[in-house]
Image (tube, rainbow, N blue to C red):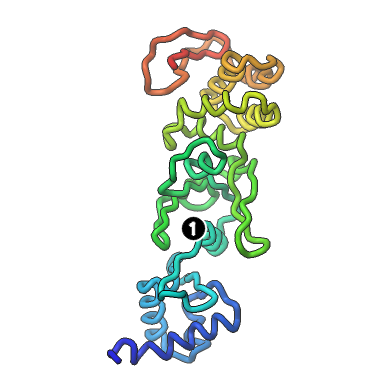
Amino acid sequence: MNKESFQFGPITTQFFAWIQAKKINIVKQGDVTRVLNISDNQERTLLYRLNKSKLIIRLFRGIYLVPDRIPPGGKWSPDRYIVLFQFIQNMGIKKYQVTGLEAFNRHGFTSQIPQMISIYNDKISGIKTIAENKYQFIKVTPERIGNTIDIQLKNEGDKILIGSMARIIFDAIYDYYRFSSLPDAYDWLIEIKKNKEVILELVNITCNIGNVASKRRVGFIIDKVLKLDLRITNKLSKSLTKNVKAIQLVPNKKWSGKIDRKWGIIDNV
């Protein structure tokens, strides 16, 4: 038996016996010291080595996600949504929702496999890698978070919130520069043309939290491309100033195309 296993083998066994008996899924630095009667240095070393060996997962400093028993094969790889759920709960994020490519894929608008989950939230910004999963946290005001559906997780009552179909189409149009989602989002609107409920929800979301550009683009597509009842876009058209400089339907593309004066749009598709 080598020095490392001699020093930490018994403590590791006690550690997993404790979390299994108590049905614990989160361990905070300091917990192990009290329960197993070891020193602070022994605890730090134990948690570091368990995390490095992929037996537990460090969510952030001092907070670890742990399995209910020693993982088969000696490595633990929990579902990335479970990791995200625990991170959100323990980070103290109060409002959030999954968006971006992960949400587009979940709603069936793209078959592209996302390499990263994007999350609007009210607390943090930045890209974090946790247990080899990448998460992009995008801080927004609480008012910009809403219109969600639930993704139920393994444990009863645990869930992840993801944007509704209407909301993620709005995100794709409003936040196109982040998600590279135009003109794809217009095709998604054409796909769901007959789903009046989603179209109406999209109009309401755009009126409530959209900027001028997103209002003009959404209004133009519903009015001129989908050719739906004009009453659907009344709220959008009334919220806009007339006689303004036209913008591109697809940003960062050619400026040539027919100009629609009602919505101030250059149809450059």
Whether residue 139 is situated above or below residue 70 in the rendered picture: above
Residue, far front: 73
Look at the image and tell me in which quarter the N terminus lies.
Answer: bottom left
Q: Image point 50% across, 75% down: which residue? A: 28
- Identify the residue shown where x is 34% and y is 92%: 6
Q: Is residue 219 above or below residue 12?
A: above
Name the quadrant of the C terminus: top left
Dividing the picture into quadrants, the one containing residue 85 is bottom right
In front of the other: 161 or 35? 161
What kind of residue is marked 1? Arg
Left or right, residue 201 beside residue 66? right
Q: Position of residue 244 (x, y in %)?
A: 51, 12
Percent x, y for residue 46? 39, 81
Instruction: Name the residue carrying label 1.
Output: 80
Q: Residues within 10 Å of mark 1 (few under 14, many from 20)?
A: some
Q: Is residue 24 left or right of residue 266?
A: right
Q: Point out residue 230 in the picture as x, y percentages from the top left corner.
A: 68, 14
Q: Is 223 in front, or is 153?
A: 153
